[in-house]
Image (tube, helix red, strand yellow):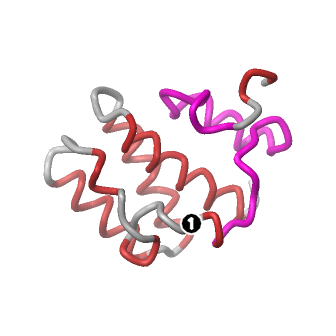
Amino acid sequence: MDRNEKILLLQLLLLDIRGNWGWENKSRSLKAQELADELGFEAHAEHIREYREWGEEDGRHFRTSVNNGGYEGMDDWHGLKHTFTDKSDEFKAIAKEYLTFPEYRFDDWKSA
């Protein structure tokens, strides 16, 4: 998985948490934390830590600008389409494991 795919995956995890904070939050937020740390995105890493410390109760926490640790504007950072079938096997495996609603995250999910 290349750097741009990691950025897209981080964005999609944050969007997924935002859209569904009812379950699976711990595993998704841990994976998001791991990606933010790997990428060296300090604002995101801190924002995710705050979310986890506050009890992972409200996914709206990530509805903020990319510079503040959120997902808004992140498309400009990775430049990738929100598609599934053209991504690496590693990306696909992680997306399948962690995203609770991939059909809302990928434009081509029905063909996946």
Instruction: Please report the residue visible at 63 percent of the width from the left and 64 percent of the height from the top.
Output: 75
In the image, taking residue 58 as reference, residue 64 lies left or right, namely right
Q: Check disc 1 and report the residue beneath it.
A: 74
Residue 89: image quadrant is: top right
Percent from the top left, x then y, of residue 73? 54, 68
Percent from the top left, x then y, of residue 2? 75, 60
State the SS at label 1.
loop
Percent from the top left, x then y, of residue 70? 41, 64
The answer to which of 26 and 76 lies nearer the viewer is 76
The answer to which of 1 and 7 lies nearer the viewer is 7
Residue occupying the far right of the picture: 86
Percent from the top left, x then y, of residue 27? 39, 37
Q: Range of the magenta residues?
A: 77-106
Instruction: Please report the residue visible at 32 percent of the width from the left and 36 percent of the height from the top.
Output: 25
**Is residue 12 part of the magenta span, yes or no?**
no
Q: Give the amino acid at mark 1.
A: Met
- Quadrant where the C terminus lies? top right
Rate crowding at label 1 as few (under 14), some (14 to 19) or many (20 or more) other CA atoms within 10 Å. some
